[in-house]
Amino acid sequence: MTTVAANAGAAAGPGADAADEPSYAVVVPCFNGAATLGRTLESVLALNPAPVEVVVVDDGSTDGSAEIAARHPVRLASHPRNLGVAVTRNHGAELSRSDVVCYVDADVVVPPDLIARFRDYLRDRPNCAAVTALVDPARLHPDFLSDYLNLRMHQGFRHVPRGVTTICTACAAIRRRDLEEVGGFDDAATRAVNDEVTVGWRMADRGLEVGVCHTLLVAHLKRMTLRRWA
């Protein structure tokens, strides 16, 4: 794997690494996300408090995604070929140096108070290893299938009475110590949802919780097709 530094990483804003709070880094895994990556990074770089760093891992994109990332003050790693989303997520965690890894997919737009919301949620829940945001169910696409996907993701997590055993890494914060304890994401997983389920189960097996922050909504820009759905 090849790592390329771009602008030496994002500058930490006020409160990004306060002594009495865990530090947060944002990791953006990307594969052919040129259509949305710019909007994702603009929202991430507007976070307040800011993360200690923003890491983008490009997984062998062929659409210029790496070039888009390089125009932003982020740390960029590029894979020479597509290695899969689990490898990409693990690589981002390895490159970052923070107490909490906040994953944001390259087709997600986050609100400015994302880190503050995640911090508030985890602060009083020491046994919670990870927390997931909710996908905004608002209609963002002209096609039914894309909006249906977002609504399904929203309802699936919103109506769980307690914790869940799946981490929706479209936008989630995971304590580094717990991610390392379960061995990270499963590199053998061939689909994104598979490695999310596996890491959640591993956490549950160790008595750790995975929570959902019901007050935190993120916009999911992904355009879904029947082929991608399958």
Image: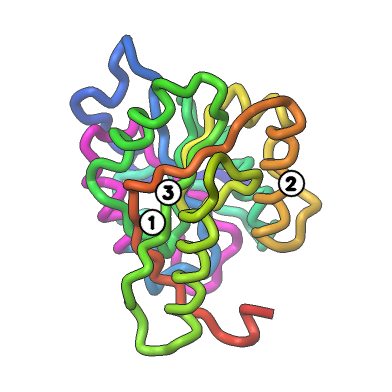
Q: Position of residue 177 (x, y in %)?
A: 60, 22
Residue linked to disc 2: 198
Residue 151 bears which disc, if any? Answer: none
Q: Residue furthest front?
A: 161
Q: Earlier in the sequence, mark 2 or mark 1?
A: 1
Relative height, residue 29 to residue 99 (above, below): below
Q: What residue would you read off at disc 1?
A: 69
Q: How far is the residue under mark 2 from the one under mark 3?
A: 19 Å
The structure residue drawn at horizontal position 51% and vertical position 19%, both measured from the top left corner, is: 126
Q: Which x, y percent locates residue 134?
A: 42, 54
Q: Mark 3: few, some, or many residues within 10 Å (few <14, many ≥20)?
A: many
**Relative vertical location of residue 117 with respect to residue 71 in this rendering, above or below:** above
Q: Which residues are magenta?
A: 39-66
Q: Position of residue 184 (x, y in %)?
A: 68, 36
For badge 3, the amino acid type reads Ala
Give the alpha-carbon distance from disc 3 to disc 1, as whole Å: 23 Å
Task: Tell me if 156 is positioned left or right of 54 in this view.
Answer: right
What element does badge 2 sit on? helix
Q: Earlier in the sequence, mark 3 or mark 1?
A: 1
Circle 3 residue: 133
